[in-house]
Amino acid sequence: MDKQQLKAFICVFEERNITRAAQLLSLTQPALSATIKALEDDLGIPLFIRKTRGVDVTEDARVLYPHARRMINDMAALASRFRKRQDKTPLTIGIEHDIASSHLVTLLEKARTTMPDVLLTLDPGCTGDIRLGCESLRCEDELFIPLFDENYELVFPATHPLNQESALTIEQLHDQSWVMLPTHDSHQRFLPFYGASASTPAANAGNFMLALDLVEADFGLTIAPKPLIETRCDLASRPLPGHPLMRRIGICYAVQALENPAIEQLLKGLSV
């Protein structure tokens, strides 16, 4: 008993006529009759009583009909489920280090509503069809869509004496113990806050998340984007003295990426 036999049975059962059922199924009448005969042989029972004009159904056929209907519907639903998965357009988004979870969730919510037929993959680092990252780290030939502006803040353990200061000057920071990020693109921008301490760091980190780990372990102060600090319950922060510093987070992409309709659709949605 296969799908073709069940569909043939259902059509003949509903039409009560071999000729009309054959036309609906785009089969010849002998081919349809052979299919029904094969099903009857498999089940070992007659399903139809041939008459001069049309057919009558047997009691066994009445029992089989709802089961056959359900089986055909289940097959169609199963095929549709996997077909939809295969028909989805693949899209990989690279997520650079030090991106706040709140920003990523905002992007994913937008992607889910604007690209329901996309199979989304997230990969860490500078990879993917497009990536969520910092504007200062985009490649020379890439375009950039800004999404979030983040202020840099001074970070320290909640019990640090600086938490009690009403106001801060840059000079007050020069004799502090610092967790620095010497290989990070932001390092040069932070040097005025380090002062003479720039040559004697308390510890070094390769990214902001690791720097915050060191601050939580009481190695010293650091500077980090505010959204990353807000997830750390044991840390306190305050605006940097003097002119504020900020960074911009958004989508980095090459012009060629727009050849993928899913990317074009997402970027249009983000620009609204």
Image (cartoon, rainbow, N blue to C red):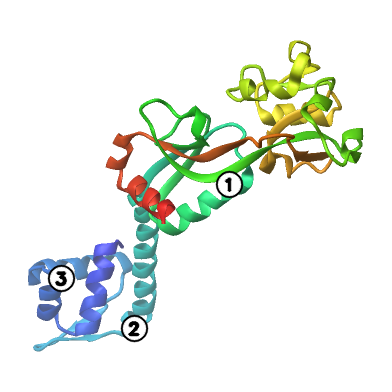
Quadrant housing residue 49:
bottom left
- Between the residue at mark 1 and the residue at mark 2, the CA separation in whole angstroms equals 59 Å
Callout 1 amino acid: His
User: Would residue 160 be visible to someone looking at this image?
Assistant: no
Q: Earlier in the sequence, mark 1 or mark 2?
A: 2
Q: Nearer the viewer, mark 1 or mark 3?
A: 1
Residue type at mark 2: give it.
Arg
Given the image, on which type of amino acid does mark 3 rest? Answer: Leu
Q: CA distance from mark 3 to mark 2?
A: 21 Å
Q: Position of residue 164 (x, y in %)?
A: 91, 40
Q: Is residue 222 above or below residue 260?
A: above
Q: Check disc 2 and report the residue beneath it.
A: 62
195 or 135, which is in the foreground? Answer: 195
Q: Nearer the viewer, mark 3 or mark 2?
A: 3
Category of crowding for the residue at label 1, using alpha-carbon neighbours closer than 10 angstroms: few (below 14), some (14–19), many (at least 20): some
Establish if 67 lies above or below 62: above
Report how far apart the C-alphas of labels 1 and 3 lie in the structure.
54 Å
**Label 2, residues with CA under 10 Å away: few <14, some 14-19, many ≥20:** few
* Residue that appears at 28% across and 69% down: 6
Position of 12 relative to 214 (above/below)? below
Secondary structure of the residue carrying numbered label 2: helix
Q: Which residue is mark 1?
A: 103
Indicate which disc, 1 or 3, sits on the residue closer to the N terminus: 3
Q: Which residue is mark 3?
A: 25
Q: Residue at x 39, y 66 (%)?
A: 74
Image quarter (top left, top right, bottom left or bottom right) of the C terminus: bottom left
Numbered disc in front, either 1 or 2: 1
Relative vertical location of residue 11 with respect to residue 167 in this rendering, above or below: below
- Is 7 situated left or right of 211 in this image? left
